[in-house]
Amino acid sequence: MALNLIFLGPPGAGKGTQADRFAATRGLPKISTGDILREAVAAGTELGLKAKSIMESGALVGDDVMIAIVRERLDRPDVKRGFILDGFPRTVTQATALESIMIGRSSLIVIDIQVPEAELVRRLTNRLICVKCGANAPESVIADSQGTVDTRCQRCGGMFVQRADDGDAVVRERLKVYEQSTRPLVEFYSARPTFCAIDGAQPPARVAELIASAVDAVSGEVGVAGGGLR
Ligand SMILES: [Zn+2]
């Protein structure tokens, strides 16, 4: 039985961190559509060139391109034991396409990391990122009153700085956009026995435990879409 997961959750919920962590713990590939797009652009593939021209025009890469990326990626053999999708689906159109990609596979487990808005605003307005590689600083790293940070990025040794776009109003607007665009997605999945609402207003290690036990609890509910075992 494969563990096929998607992660939903607003900016600041720790979705990327938790997806990375779960993937590493279970030895499953984490499939980030953002990474695939960047690699395709860098490699100059047909898909990459198409995506590049769309992005250069200032538009967002549309559903059809994103769906093609995911369909191609989920055809590779390393997803046999399962996968974790990060950044997909973002729209009901994408979710519907994913349903057809999932035919004949173990059904999706949906992890929805829920955090109250006030807590998200607190986290996002205080967020520090590495100036060189963009990694998020660990929760324990906090700027002093002068905005100075002693700790350096563990990944590349860069300095941590406060994200320039994370003012309070900007953060609230981002959360509103997220809420409006993804509420239909949550409704799309929430009635399923494999939908897991996770309390994300907890320390990261605790959230990881909640996710692990929720996945183990619903694994018994995982059927195979479209019949047949795989
Ligand atoms: Zn860094």
Image (cartoon, rainbow, N blue to C red):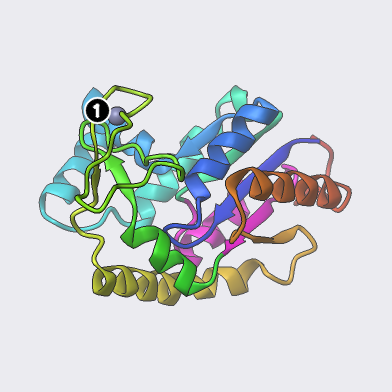
Label 1 crowd (10 A; few <14 / some 14-19 / many >=20): some
Quadrant, the N terminus: top right
Quadrant, the C terminus: top right
> What amino acid does circle 1 point to?
Gly
Span shown in magenta = 88-114
Q: Position of residue 109 (x, y in %)?
A: 70, 51
Q: Is residue 15 above or below residue 117?
A: above
Residue 121, quarter of picture: bottom left
Residue identifier under label 1: 158
Residue at 37 percent across and 34 percent down: it is 36
Q: Position of residue 162 (x, y in %)?
A: 24, 50
Residue at 28 percent across and 53 percent down: it is 61
Asked if residue 103 can be seen in this view, the reply is no
Residue at 30 percent across and 47 percent down: it is 143
Q: Position of residue 132 (x, y in %)?
A: 21, 31
Residue 229, quarter of picture: top right
Left or right of 144? Residue 77 is right
Q: Is residue 161 above or below residue 24?
A: below
Residue at 25 percent across and 35 percent down: it is 48
Asked if residue 181 can be seen in this view, the reply is yes
Q: Is residue 150 above or below residue 209?
A: above
Residue 189, quarter of picture: bottom right
Residue 187 on the magenta segment: no
Residue 109 on the magenta segment: yes
Q: Give the quarter the ligand 1 occupies.
A: top left
Q: Position of residue 186 (x, y in %)?
A: 58, 69
Q: Is mark 1 within 8 Å of ligand 1?
A: yes
Q: Residue pushed farthest front?
A: 145
